[in-house]
Amino acid sequence: MKKFFACFAFASLFSSSLFAAPIEVLKIERFDGAKFMGTDFIPAKYRISLQVNWQKNSGYAREQLLEDIRYGMSLYRQCDLALEELVVVDFETKKRLEEMDNKFRKNKKLVNKLPHLLEGPTVYFVRDLEAFGKKKDKYHYTKPSAYAFSAKEVRKDEERKPLLNSTWFAAKELMDPKYWKGRDRSYSVIAHELGHLLFNDGHFKGVKNLMAARVGNLNSFIPPALCQKLLDSPLIQ
Ligand SMILES: [Zn+2]
C-alpha cells in the first residue's frame, strides 16, 4: 500500500512538471487595419500586416499596448505606409518563461510554440528581456527595454535565424517611469524597433529622428532616406 502511494505521488509530480503546457494561447483576435487605426488611418501606397503576441503575465495592460501600436503605426504615415491587418495573440506562460535569456533560447521557444498567423513582422510583448552587451569595454548582462532581429542582425549569427523579423519588448522596463527620462514624448519604441526590421538597418545619425541611437536624439521624425529603404523590404505589401 505504501508503495502505491509513493508511485501515485511521483506520477502527479511528474505530470504537473513535465506535461503541463508552459505556454498557453488564451485568445486570438484579428483587426482590420483601417478599423483598428480609426481616425489615424489614411490610405497609403505601402501596407504592412503585424502579429502581436502579448504575454498576459507581462503585467503590461493590453489596452495600453494596443494604443502604443496604434500610435507607433501612425508615425509610418511619413513613409506612406499603413497597417493592413493586425492579429493579437494573448498568451500566458509558466514563471520560468517570464524572463527571456541572453542566449535567446526562451525567445526561440516562444517563436516555435506560438502560432504564426501572418506574413510580416512579429511583435513579442513579454515581461522581461535579458541580453549580453558591451559597456565601457566590459561585457555584462543588461536589461534592455527592447530589441529587434532584422535580416542584417540575424546574418551575424546563424543561431538567431528562427528569430528573423521578430521584435521584443520588456513590459517591466517600459512601465518604469525612468524609461522616459531624457526621451521626447513623441517617440515610439514600437515604431523604432519595427524600423530596424523594415529598414533592415541600425541607427540613423545626423538629425533627431525615430532611429537615432542616443536617447536625447530620439523623436518621431522618419527621414525620407529611411523611407526609401522600404522599397527593398520583403515585409511590405
Ligand atoms: Zn535601435
Image (cartoon, rainbow, N blue to C red):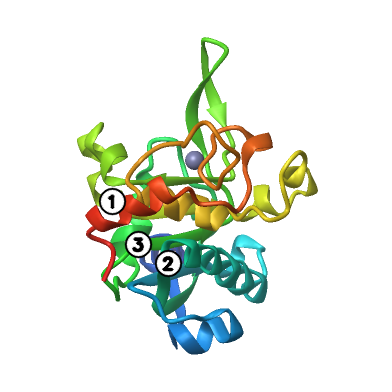
In the image, the residue with mark 2 has its CB under 8 Å from the nearest atom of ligand 1? no
Of the two numbered discs 3 and 2 on the same chain, state the one appearing first in sequence.
Answer: 2
Of the two numbered discs 2 and 1 on the same chain, state the one appearing first in sequence.
Answer: 2
Q: What element does badge 3 sit on?
A: loop
Q: Amino acid at mark 1?
A: Leu
Image quadrant for the C terminus?
bottom left
Disc number for residue 121: 3
- Above/below status of 31 relative to 10: below
Q: What element does badge 2 sit on?
A: strand
Asked if marks 2 and 1 touch (Cβ < 8 Å), the reply is no
Asked if marks 3 and 2 touch (Cβ < 8 Å), the reply is no
Disc number for residue 23: 2
User: What residue do we see at 54% from left, 38% from top?
Assistant: 212
Estimate the x, y position of residue 176 in percent, counting from the top left.
75, 49
Q: Amino acid at mark 2?
A: Ile
How far is the residue under mark 2 from the one under mark 1? 21 Å
* Observer-nearest of 204 and 94: 204
How far is the residue under mark 1 from the one under mark 3? 9 Å
Image quadrant for the N terminus?
bottom left
